[in-house]
Amino acid sequence: VRLDGPLVLSDTQQTAFDGLCRQMDGEKPGVALLYGVTGSGKTSVYLKLIERCLRMGKSAMLLVPEIALTPQLLSLLAAHFGDSVAVMHSSLSGGERYDQWKRLRSGEAKVAVGTRSAVFAPCENLGILILDEEQEHSYKSETPPRYSAKEVAIWRGAKENALVLFGSATPSVESMYRAKSGLYQLYRL
């Protein structure tokens, strides 16, 4: 993914993006699975979807399974969306976390990026919730309060009429089953 200039999608990325946009514009956007091997361009599709949400006056959320993935993704998002990005994860101090929370709550920041707990970020008018590498077990909290960020995202998407997008090169068995049975829309790269 390029840090400079406009983001140009390949034909297969554009096809997935167009389908996801139609789904996002629907009355009940529901859940989608973006299935593509590593390097197929899932991140480019994410960026275009986030860009579209921001243009529509909506906010977006991008969750990653590990804090280690946050810095490189954050620099990519900052290059595209500047100060409208807020980061939330457990390595931040309490004060830093509160500052990011306030930026999202006030609407100063419109894109929340973080690990599983970021699913609770106070994003107003959500357009999309993206969980990258959705098959990772770290989306489930092993300590009280126990929760699954995937299930919270599905609930929140339904409640706020936002598209929930799971992305993976190796989807979980349950997500692939739900996609194949029509509960989720399936897009391939």
Image (spheres, helix red, strand yellow):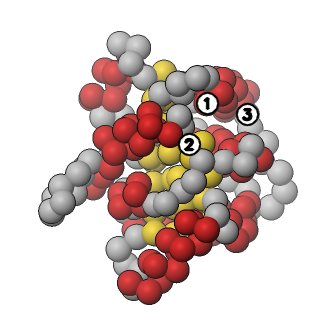
Identified by mark 2, the residue type is Ile
Element class at badge 2: strand
Image: 70 above or below 167 = below
- Mark number displayed over residue 128: 2
Does any portion of residue 64 appear in the rendered image? Answer: no
Image: 50 above or below 12 = below
Q: Residue at x 38, y 18 (%)?
A: 183
Element class at badge 1: helix
Identified by mark 3, the residue type is Ser
Q: In the displayed orientation, state which residue is furthest to the top.
A: 181
The residue at which mark 1 appears reads as 24
Element class at badge 3: loop
- Say which label, 2 or 1, has the lower sequence index: 1
- Mark number displayed over residue 3: none
Q: Tell me whether circle 2 and circle 3 mark residues in contact (CB < 8 Å).
A: no
Point out residue 46 in the picture as x, y percentages from the top left corner: 61, 45
Q: Residue at x 35, y 57 (%)?
A: 116
